Amino acid sequence: MSKGKAWAAFGLSAVALALATPVAAKSLDMEGRAAAAATVTRGQARFTVLTSGLIRMEWSPTARFVDAPSQVFIDREQPVPRFTTTVENGRLVIRTDALEMSYILDSGRFTAANLSVRSRTLKPAFSWRPGTAATGNLHGTARTLDRYSGDRQIDNGSRLDLGQGLISRDGWHVVDDSSSFVFDGDREAPWVQKRDCGDCQDLYFFGYGHDYTTALGDYAKVAGRQPMPPRFAFGYWWSRYWNYSDRELRDLVGDLDRTGFPLDVLVIDMDWHRTDDLSWDPRYVVKDEVGEGVGWTGYSWNRSLFPDPKRFLSWLEQRKVKATLNLHPASGIPPREETYAAFAKAMGVTDGKAVPFEGADRRFVDNWFKLTLDPLTAQGVDFWWLDWQQWPESKVMPGLSNTWWLNHLFYTRMQQADANRALIYHRWGGLGNHRYQIGFSGDAVITWDSLAYQPYFTATASNVLYGYWSHDIGGHMFADGLAPEQRKIDPELYVRWMQFGAFSPILRTHSAKDGNLRKEPWRFSPEVLSTLRDTVALRYQLAPYIYTASRQAYDTGVSILRPLYYAWPDQAQAYAERGQYMFGDDMLLAPVTKAGKDGVTQTSIWLPPGQWYDSNRGETLSGGRTIVRDYLLNEIPLFVRAGAVIPMNPPSMQNLQQVDGSKLVLRVLPGGSARTRLYEDAGDSEGYRGDAYSFTPITSARDTGQAQLTVHPREGRYPGMAAARQITIEFPAATLPTRVTVNGASYSRSDQPSEGSWHYVGNALTARIVVPAIAADAQLNVQVEFAPDTRIEGLAYRMKRTAAAVAWLKDHWPAPEPLPDDVSLAGQFGQLVDYEPERLATLIAEFDQRSTRLVPLVQASRASPEVKAEFARRIAMIRAER
C-alpha cells in the first residue's frame, strides 16, 4: 500500500481522505526533466502535464526550453497522468481528468487571446486566461513580523502583505516562474545561475476547485516536500536576547529542571561572539569597512562570557539540550576574527582588510563553511540561527534573494556534511523556502493584537507549505513610548501566548535585550507558574501526535497547523474564523487572544459540522454552529474530533531526545470511531526520507456504553526501535467500567496504577488501563463496558469550576470561621471519587445536590456582601454552561 493510500485508509478527517498520493522518497538530488511522455511541444511552446490539475506552460522565442530545476520547482519527473492531446480548429487542446487547456498554435507569447484553461470536473467551475484577476486568493506568508503589532507596522502604520498563496477560492492559481534562477548540473553541490532567456515564459497552472489539499500535494511533488524537523525541535526552546554567560546558562538550565520544565533547545543570541562597539543609538553606531554596523557579525567566542566554549557545549550535550547560535553574516570576515588570517589567505586577500560577504561566490561560501563555521559545529553547535537582515539581493547576481539562497546553502550543507537530520532556523525567503525549516517570524510587539494575529499568520503560511513558523512566544519588545511603569510583562497575556505556542509548530520563548522582559517561569505567581508548567507538559505529552502530523505534512503537503477551509471549503465560517485552526487532523483550536475580566475570558467558537469533544468541559457537542464559552486562565479552547485516538507520551516526559517508543499513552475520546496511525522513526536522522520509519495502525470505537480499541502490529523498521512497548489506554469523561478485557483476558480494578489492571482517576474522570509491555509487532485488542450514566457529560467542567469557586471563596472567607461542610465537600469532589470510585454514581448525585445548596449556604454566612455576590456569580456561570 502506498503512503498516500494508507493515509486515506487510516485518516480521521475529510482532509486526510482527500490528500494527494505522495511520490516515493528520493535522494537529495533534484530532477528537473519531466518524463518525455508528459511533454507536448509545438513550435515555440511546450506544455508539461505534471498532474491532472497541474500543467507547466512554456514559451520560448528560440524553442529552447528549461529542464534544469528552478528555485521553486525542483522535481518535474512525476508519474505521467492520464491526458489527451488533439488539434481542433488550429488550437492545441490538452485534456486531463480535471482540466482543459487550449492554445492557438504558432501564435506567439501567451496572452489572453491565445491561451486558456478551464475546469472540466472541478467545483467551483472556472475559466482562466493570462491576465484574469485572482480575486479569491487566500494568501501566503511574509518575511518577518519585525516591529509589527498584529498586522500593523508600528513605524509607518502599513498593513502586512502576506502575498499570494497557492490556494484561492477561485479554484486556481498560477505561479510565474519565468524569472526565477535555475540550478546548474552539479549533482554534488548544485549552484544557482540565471536563465539564458530573459523573454521566455514559464507558467505553472494549478487547477483544483475547492480541493485545496490536492493542490498542496501537487505543489509538494514538484517543489519539494516539507522536511521533518528532528524530534527534539518539537520540544521547548528557551531563547532570550541577553549577554548570558556560561555560568548563567548552566543555572538557567538547572532552574528549569528544578521547577519542572522540560527543555530540548537552548538558543544563544548574538552575544555568544564578541560585539565590541555595537550600539543601537545612531550617535554611537560605528560602521565597518563594508558599511555595516560593527558588532553584529561575529564568529569568535566572547571568552569573558564563555571561557571554554567546547566544554560548555559538551555540558549541554550531556544534558541532552541542543544548542543553536545566532549569525548576522553581512560584514563578511573582518580582521578581528580568529579565522581571518586563514580565510584571507584562502581568498587571496593581502591588504589586511575585511573579506566582504557574498553568498553567490562559491569560493567565499566554501571557505566560510570550511574555515569558520564547520570548526564551530565541531565544538558542539547543533544548528544555526541564520538572521539575515541586510541587503535583499546578491551583489554579484542581482535578483537572487540573499535570504532564500542562504537558507538553501545552510540546509543543504548540513545534509551533505552530517548524518543527523538537517535543521536551520531562519527567515522566510519566498517560494521554495518550505524545503528548509524552521522559520522565525521576528520581533513582534508585545500586544494582544500581536497574539491575536499569529494564529491566522501561521495557518495562512501553510498555503505555501511553510508549515514551521517559530514565533517569539510572549512577544519580542514593548511598544515604543510605553511609560516606564507599563514596561512589564502582563502574566495573562504571556500565559495565553504560551498556550498558543503549545499548539503551534514550534514552542520557543524569546524577547529583546530589556531587563524588564524576564520570562523565567519562577518569576511569576504560583498560579501562573503552575499554568505555564502544565502548558509545557501538555506539549510534551502531545509530541507523538504532533510528530505523526509532521510526517503527514512531509508525505502530503498539508501542514500541522492549517486553516479550517482545507476540510470545510464550502462553509463560509471556515474562511471567516481567522483565529481558529486545525492542529493535525483531529484538534480544533480557538486560542484565547484577548484580556479577560474577573479572571474569565469569553470566547466565540465556530464548531464545523460533525461531532466534537470539548476537552475543557468533558462533553461531546454537535458542530455546524457557533458557541460561546468562558475560559479561566488555565483553560484552553481545545476541541477534538469525537471518537479520536490521540497518541501521547507519559506525563513524566522531560526531553524528546529520550523517546525510544517503549512507552505510549492512547487517549480514546467518546462519541465515535477512528482509524489512525502512529508514526515513529529514530528522531534525528535523514533515514525517514527512505524507508527507516514505522507506522502503527490504530482503530477504535466508543460510545456511552462501550469502547473497543485495536492497536495493530507495527509496520516498518528503523534503527533503535523498541521491540516491545508498554501501552496505557485512557478513556476521559467515562463512567466506571463494569468489564475490561485485554486480548481476551479480564482486568480487575486497582486502587493504584499497576500493570495488568485498570484504575479510575477521579480528578480527571478518566478510566485508565495499564497494559504490560507487549511485542510491538503483536496486536492489542481492548474492550470496555461502562456503567450507563449520562450525567458524566460536562461533569469535568462543573467539578473543576466548582473547585475553583471554592478555592476563591477560601481566600475571601472571614477568618477564623470554617467553611460550611457541603461547600468544602463540593470543592473536592474529584478526590472523593479517587477514594471511592465504586461509589461514582452516588457521589455524582451528592455533588449535584450540594451544588444547589452552595449559594444559599454562603448567603447565610457572615461573609461580606461583596464576597457573597461574587461567589454567587461564579456558581451561576457554571450553571449557565450546562
Image (cartoon, rainbow, N blue to C red):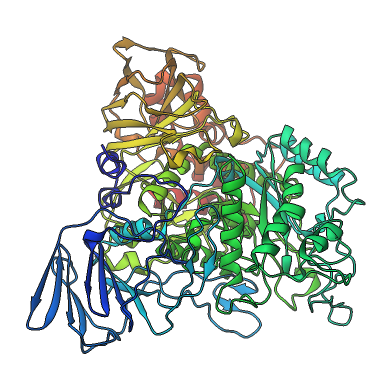
Task: Name the spot of residue 83 as percent of width and height, x first.
Answer: 15, 62
In the displayed structure image, the side of residue 373 where residue 430 appears, left or right? left
In the image, residue 567 above or below residue 59: above
Which residue sits furthest left? Answer: 89
Task: Name the spot of residue 81 as percent of width and height, x first.
Answer: 20, 57
Total numbered circles: 0
Task: Name the spot of residue 141 as percent of width and height, x first.
Answer: 48, 69
In the image, residue 118 above or below residue 583: below
Kindly identify the residue that appears in the image at 56 percent across and 53 percent down.
412
Which residue sits furthest bottom? Answer: 113
User: Splitting the image into 4 quarters, where does residue 350 fall?
Assistant: bottom right
In the image, residue 850 above or below residue 721: below
In the displayed structure image, the side of residue 266 where residue 835 appears, left or right? left
User: Splitting the image into 4 quarters, where does residue 358 fall?
Assistant: bottom right
Task: Name the spot of residue 101 as percent of width and height, x first.
Answer: 18, 74
Depth order, front residue of 107/660:
107
User: Splitting the image into 4 quarters, where does residue 70 fall?
Assistant: bottom left
In the image, residue 587 above or below residue 190: above
**Where, quadrant-wise, is the N terminus in this rendering?**
top left
